[in-house]
Image: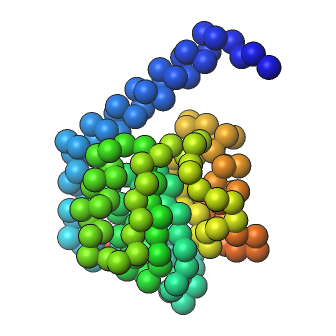
Amino acid sequence: MIKNKEKDGNDIQKMLDTRESFEYQWKNIPEGAYLLSDGKFRENVDKILLDEMNMSRDRFGGSLVLDAGCGNGRWTYGFLKLGCQVVALDYTWSGCIGTKNNTRQFRYAHIILADILHMPLRRNVFDIVFCWGCATPHWGHETRLPKLNKCLKKGRYSTYLCLRSKELKG
């Protein structure tokens, strides 16, 4: 099927503009509330994840997690604190570099530069697939959700998407 070229061009431009915006954010504004530069957040990010996901700590240890759209690695850091192995994926260089810098003390952090729509990952691999805001209706959840779900092991935890977070507690 041939799609409308004008629409495709607009979609490509929107993707490029979005990538540029996030690239700018992670490169130029890496600090702030609810980021790892926030000492209270950094100290409690694992507890915040437990609360946000409504899961107990014992369900995480040893799990293989995909953090899709990891940004600067704040949630990757939290999963690592919970004893998980994490594949952190972002489509910006600045995000991947930030994640690398923020998780260098952990052994099981693997960082990949890729888009959720074109992930170089096998199917049925992950125990938990986590995506904080990158698969909302605004960002095209109808195409991203199936891609994320394919990465999840059959019978494992549901894909977790934060479409609208509760107020973060520190």
Picture quadrant of residue 44: bottom left
In this orientation, does residue 159 appear? yes
- The front one of 104 and 67 is 104
Picture quadrant of residue 77: bottom left
Most distant residue in the top direction: 6
State whether residue 39 is above or below residue 117.
below
The mark total stands at 0
Task: Kindly identify the residue that appears in the image at 67 percent across and 40 percent down.
Answer: 143
Most distant residue in the bottom direction: 58
* Quarter of the image that includes the N terminus: top right
Residue 157 is situated, as x and y percent measured from the top left of the image, at 67, 72
- The front one of 109 and 43 is 109
Task: Kindly identify the residue that appears in the image at 69 percent across and 12 percent down.
Answer: 4
Task: Kindly identify the residue that appears in the image at 40 percent across and 34 percent down.
Answer: 19
Q: Is residue 35 left or right of residue 56?
A: left
Picture quadrant of residue 38: bottom left
In this orientation, does residue 163 appear? no
Q: Is residue 123 left or right of residue 24?
A: right
Residue 52 is situated, as x and y percent measured from the top left of the image, at 50, 69
State whether residue 22 is above or below residue 16.
below
Q: Is residue 29 left or right of residue 61?
A: left
Task: Kindly identify the residue that appears in the image at 32 percent across and 72 percent down.
Answer: 170
Residue 59 is situated, as x and y percent measured from the top left of the image, at 58, 85
Q: How is the image coloured?
A: rainbow
Residue 148 is situated, as x and y percent measured from the top left of the image, at 63, 54
Q: Is residue 164 left or right of residue 28?
A: right
